């Protein structure tokens, strides 16, 4: 490509890419499919590689790729970066106090109209000054001490929502001030990845943002993605500035800068209070942390009139919300057992008001996290409750760890260890090597897992007890009528009619359904046990392979792995399940209660009258559903086909059997009704 042609094309590509970038990262409205964006980006990269003279500072290809620095250069701010006064009274009175002060200082009387304010969020990140000359980003600096900050241009270039070039009629010089922050989804994703790599996690999004900005290697900064919201100005030249703060923010948005949509102009104290309380409601659902809202006198002329005290403008205040992180002490560390048996260490805390509620427990997630954070009894810890997430222990204040008062200064308490048995049922706790979560193995008998286990047991693809749903299981377990699946078969009418909302008729129906479920298949029964890692398909394979339950229960790891699709992980889960005496006990009780299935010999040496035979099912059988009949046939090594042919061995026919029955008769195939079919199975 000729130089002139390449130069023109590069310019077109840059504009196109920046326009898409703006739509994607600032407006959150993508205009191009990712693949097309990538194509444009690569084309630009290729042109720039061929003609290095064409590389400009504002090229979108220059966001990453800066070299690691030895240190940050100092930047003297053309206009000092001020801080903002905080109102710590988190109640409406805090807003009234600010409005009263402003009115007094503006010498407004009772009769004067309310003051107009620009209201916005107080972002919880790091203040940054972006300097644009002729619309091109030339420098980004931290606040530092307000007079002098650090040059973090390379890292700021990696922040996708910050334009490298402004749009429209741009001022000769404009400095834009705002907050660089890490969004909650980016924070969670980063920590998730770190956890999976066994690496250190970020304490909170704020620290994540600070750490990212202060990375000397921009490649590392790019790995911790940040976002940015503009909220003010520094130096500017050659610009007709609007007369209000809200007008300034509108102008910044028009230049292509990200300005948070949660802002407004309001009148007087009532307007401030409404915004404060409205945003408090919205706080949990925002994708980033805020620690309050900011009120600014909207008129710039009035701002000038009000001026500054030391480093804080009189015309602005940050009105806080209750903190999302607080210090408290650990009184005990216990473990909780979840509905699926997951064992979670939990810190019992001295009550502390955090994130708007009183917190007495905080999760430590799992054993690895608990040990990494090294939380111990007596420790002073940072507790965090942000959004509607469960409160968590973020870190330990090591200097405050209680220690024995003698030489050596040993900590008073040992590191946390996960118990080996379930605190609820006493069954063994297992934690496969490659998993973070430890689990209780007492699935069938563990009270913590009872409801879940019973629902699974009764499920349509398991024992298929019709009418035994969520609500009923809840009531039966809460009333201590049912503890294990075996108890279901001991239920009497009386116990059930006493339950809330349980009519006579539905109780009778449920009892009938329980009774009917007793005759099942081995595969369904195995599936119903809820053995970890044993789904429906594996249960069928196991039933086919072993033919009867005792053979399965007696199988060792090697033998289990002979089953198709059963590997070491599944085999271990099965072996552990049957090694648990409580589980075996429940199985014995179930058999004693009359739960049964046609047992066969192992598939390896199948010799049932059914094995290898082909069945066709047609019409409606009196008691068996099509699924049930099919399962029974398959459990004994038979096959079920969809249509009748010369290869069909048996046709099982029920009411309203149609053409399949006719065809079977023509071909002279043995036809069975349900009773004859059951007889055959028993042979
Ligand atoms: S205005 C002249 N507006 O809070 C006032 N600051 O001390 C200058 N902050 O670190 C600040 N959100 O980075 C302003 N909407 C907002 C803000 C905000 C967060 C930060 C700022 C600074 C601190 C104020």
Image (cartoon, rainbow, N blue to C red):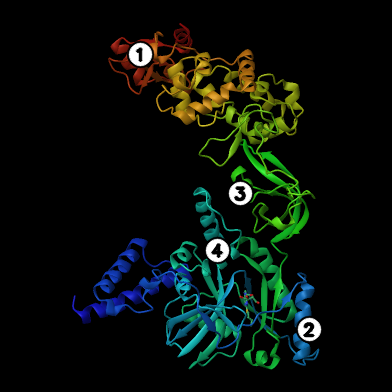
28 above or below 196?
A: below
- Of labels 1 and 3, earlier in sequence is 3
Alpha-carbon distance for marks 1 and 3? Answer: 59 Å
Q: Position of residue 603 (x, y in %)?
A: 40, 15
Point out which mark residue 183 bears: 4
Residue lying at the far top of the rendered structure = 683
- Of labels 2 and 1, earlier in sequence is 2
- Of labels 2 and 3, earlier in sequence is 2
Q: Is residue 177 left or right of residue 388?
A: left
Q: Around disc 4, counting alpha carbons within 10 Å, would you say few (fewer than 14), some (14 to 19), or many (20 or more)? A: many
Residue lying at the far left of the rendered structure = 2
In the image, what residue occupies the spot 76% across and 72% down? Answer: 88
For ligand 1, which image quadrant applies?
bottom right
Q: Around disc 2, counting alpha carbons within 10 Å, would you say few (fewer than 14), some (14 to 19), or many (20 or more)? A: some
Alpha-carbon distance for marks 2 and 3? Answer: 50 Å
- Of labels 4 and 3, earlier in sequence is 4
Judged by depth in the image, the label closer to the viewer, 4 or 3, is: 3
Residue at mark 2: 100
Q: Nearer the viewer, residue 74 or 185?
A: 74
Residue at mark 1: 613
Alpha-carbon distance for marks 4 and 3? Answer: 24 Å
Q: Which of 633 and 398 is in front in this view?
A: 398
Point out which mark residue 372 bears: 3
Q: Around disc 3, counting alpha carbons within 10 Å, would you say few (fewer than 14), some (14 to 19), or many (20 or more)? A: some
Are circles 2 and 1 on residues that touch, CB within 8 Å?
no
Are circles 1 and 4 on residues that touch, CB within 8 Å?
no
In the image, what residue occupies the spot 51% across and 55% down? Answer: 189
Q: Quadrant of residue 209?
A: bottom right
Q: Could you tell me which quadrant the C terminus lies in?
A: top left
Alpha-carbon distance for marks 1 and 4? Answer: 62 Å
């Amino acid at each position: 490509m000729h130089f002139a042609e390449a130069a023109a094309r590069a310019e077109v590509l840059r504009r196109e890419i920046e326009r898409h970038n703006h739509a994607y990262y600032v407006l959150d409205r993508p205009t191009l499919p990712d693949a097309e964006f990538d194509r444009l980006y690569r084309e630009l990269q290729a042109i720039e590689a061929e003609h290095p003279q064409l590389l400009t500072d504002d090229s979108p290809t220059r966001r990453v790729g800066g070299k690691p620095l030895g240190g940050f250069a100092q930047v003297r701010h053309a206009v000092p970066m001020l801080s903002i006064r905080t109102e710590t009274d988190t109640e409406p009175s805090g807003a009234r106090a600010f409005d009263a002060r402003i009115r007094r200082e503006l010498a407004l009387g009772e009769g004067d109209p309310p003051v107009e304010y620009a209201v916005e969020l107080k972002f919880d990140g790091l203040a940054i000054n972006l300097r644009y000359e002729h619309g091109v980003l030339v420098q980004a600096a931290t606040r530092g001490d307000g007079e002098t900050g650090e040059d973090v241009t390379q890292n700021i270039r990696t922040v996708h929502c910050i334009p490298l070039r402004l749009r429209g009629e741009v001022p000769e010089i404009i400095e834009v001030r705002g907050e660089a922050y890490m969004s909650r989804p980016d924070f969670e994703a980063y920590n998730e990845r770190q956890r999976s790599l066994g690496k250190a996690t970020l304490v909170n999004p704020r620290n994540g943002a600070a750490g990212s900005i202060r990375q000397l290697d921009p490649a590392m900064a790019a790995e911790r993605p940040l976002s940015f919201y503009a909220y003010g100005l520094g130096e500017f030249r050659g610009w007709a500035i609007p007369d209000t703060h809200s007008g300034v923010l509108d102008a910044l948005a028009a230049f292509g800068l990200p300005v948070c949509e949660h802002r407004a102009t309001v009148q007087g104290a009532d307007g401030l209070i409404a915004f404060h309380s409205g945003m408090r409601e919205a706080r949990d659902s925002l994708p980033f942390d805020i620690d309050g809202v900011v009120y600014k006198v909207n008129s710039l002329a009035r701002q000038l009139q009000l001026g500054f005290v030391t480093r804080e403008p009189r015309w602005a205040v940050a009105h806080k919300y209750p903190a999302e992180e607080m210090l408290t002490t650990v009184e005990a560390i216990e473990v909780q057992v979840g509905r699926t048996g997951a064992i979670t260490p939990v810190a019992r805390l001295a009550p502390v008001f955090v994130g708007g509620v009183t917190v007495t427990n905080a999760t430590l997630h799992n054993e690895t996290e608990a040990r990494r954070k090294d939380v111990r009894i007596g420790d002073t810890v940072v507790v965090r409750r942000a959004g509607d997430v469960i409160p968590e222990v973020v870190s330990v204040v090591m200097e405050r760890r209680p220690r024995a008062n003698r030489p050596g200064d040993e900590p008073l308490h040992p590191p946390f260890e996960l118990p080996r048995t379930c605190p609820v049922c006493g069954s063994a706790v297992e934690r496969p090597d490659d998993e973070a979560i430890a689990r209780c193995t007492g699935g069938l008998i563990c009270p913590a897992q009872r409801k879940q286990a019973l629902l699974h047991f009764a499920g349509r693809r398991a024992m298929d007890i019709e009418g035994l749903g969520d609500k009923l299981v809840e009531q039966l377990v809460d009333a201590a009528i049912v503890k294990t699946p075996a108890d279901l078969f001991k239920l009497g009418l009386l116990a059930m009619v006493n339950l809330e909302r349980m009519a006579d008729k539905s109780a009778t129906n449920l009892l009938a359904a329980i009774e009917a479920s007793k005759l099942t298949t081995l595969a369904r029964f195995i599936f119903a046990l809820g053995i970890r890692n044993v789904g429906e398909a594996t249960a069928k394979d196991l039933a086919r392979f072993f033919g009867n339950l005792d053979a399965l229960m007696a199988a060792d790891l090697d033998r289990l792995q002979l089953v198709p699709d059963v590997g070491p992980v599944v085999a271990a889960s099965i072996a552990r399940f049957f090694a648990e005496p409580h589980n075996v006990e429940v199985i014995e009780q179930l058999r004693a209660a009359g739960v049964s299935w046609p047992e066969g010999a192992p598939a390896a040496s199948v010799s049932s009258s059914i094995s290898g035979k082909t069945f066709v099912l047609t019409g409606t059988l009196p008691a068996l559903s099509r699924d049930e009949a099919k399962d029974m046939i398959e459990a004994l090594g038979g096959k079920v086909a969809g249509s009748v042919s010369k290869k069909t061995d048996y046709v099982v026919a029920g009411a309203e059997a149609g053409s399949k029955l006719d065809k079977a008769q023509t071909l002279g195939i043995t036809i069975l009704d349900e009773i004859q079919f059951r007889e055959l199975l028993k042979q």
